[in-house]
Amino acid sequence: MTDDVLTLTAPSGATAQIALQRGFNLFRLALPAGNETVEAIAAEPEFPAGGKPSHSGIPLLFPFPNRIRAGEFVTEQQSSHLLPLGDGPGEARDDGAGNAIHGFAFDRPWTLTRQDESSATAEFLMSKDDPDRAALWPGDGRLTARYELTADGLRCDLTVENLGDEPMPFGLGTHPYFALPVGSTSGDGAAADCTVTVPAAARYELIGGIPTGEILPLEDDYDLRDGPRYGSLELDDVYTQVAATPDDPGMIESVIANPANGLRIVQRCDAAFREQVVFTPPWFREGEARSATKGAICIEPYTCATDAVNLEQGGADAGWRTLEPGGRFETWFEIVVTAG
């Protein structure tokens, strides 16, 4: 464990750990449910001291989630931008296929601004915390995240601000790795038998991980509305037309359930997260992981589609946002575990 790991606790017995220097990544979340404490978030054994920052916990993706094709884009003001790809200063992460991936915030140290027993707040200011890459982006963005252990589970409030003197385009996403099977410490059930429910009615056609702009109806293998088994899924897809809950038009809810013990991980988020990426990470599915005792699935709330900035240049409504100087955008998500 590294010295920069923050630990949060709550009277309920809930515990969370956050790696401040690796993207303010919340990589452990233990929540009580019934007579059990459920480890809700998956992380590679070497994280946070090692491993890729995008392969564990809850990476926070800003100023764009997922990919920008070839790292190239044009803003609403028709200014052209190129993100050099690589792992060095002033280079955006490469997805291995020549596209920029996951923004700037997920792999850099953040600045802690406040902490108490059950909450922590930190910020990522592009010009301060990643000046080399900030020089490539229009506007100077600050992302602030506040994690709090509540009576019900975990709450995260997110704020994006444009502190620069020109309009700032952005998208925002989270990339949680949910641990399977739900309630694995009890030994009940297998990862393969857990069910995954996401209220999305369509998905983007992808070529090489990049949307073509065409929206596809859901075939059986992609339809997650009725809770298919995790063991039948092999996904890395951008879902859209995501429905809000019937009781609250401002909230979206996704559920991972273990039929063997009745435990459920519930992710709720602001309806501003209009797209959801669903990903079955192969590094948690090796050997026995997929079919027997362990696994993970990502249900990733995004404010926009993958490569939204280029989709919108082509006339699509993909959720890309622009903040004027001094502008502010606020949103949230929650993770709870329920029993029965």
Image: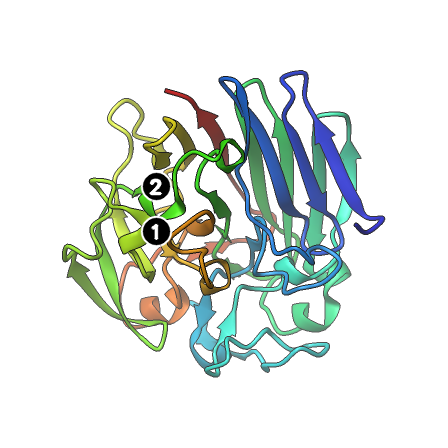
Image height of 76 relative to 15, above or below? below
Q: CA distance from mark 1 to mark 2?
A: 23 Å
The residue drawn where x is 56% and y is 60% is 55
Q: Residue furthest right?
A: 3
Nearest the viewer among 57 and 141 is: 57
Nearest the viewer among 134 and 289 is: 289
Image height of 43 relative to 72, above or below? above
Image height of 264 relative to 72, above or below? above
- In the visual, does 31 lie left or right of 313? right
Tell me whether circle 1 and circle 2 mark residues in contact (CB < 8 Å): no
The disc placed on residue 2 is: none
The residue drawn where x is 69% and y is 43% is 18
Please state the horizontal and vertical placement of residue 250, each as a whole percent of the image: 35, 31
Please state the horizontal and vertical placement of residue 79, each as a whole percent of the image: 49, 76
Query: How many residues crowd around disc 2 within 10 Å: few (fewer than 14), some, or many (20 or more)?
Result: many
Q: Amino acid at mark 1?
A: Glu
- Where disc 1 sits, the SS reads strand
Q: Earlier in the sequence, mark 1 or mark 2?
A: 2
Snapshot quadrant of residue 245: top left
Query: Circle 2 sits on which residue?
Result: 194
Nearest the viewer among 105 and 21 is: 21
> Can residue 302 be seen here?
no
Q: Which one is in front in this view, the residue at disc 1 or the one at disc 2?
A: 2
The disc placed on residue 275 is: 1
Please state the horizontal and vertical placement of residue 338, each as a whole percent of the image: 43, 24
Q: Amino acid at mark 2?
A: Cys
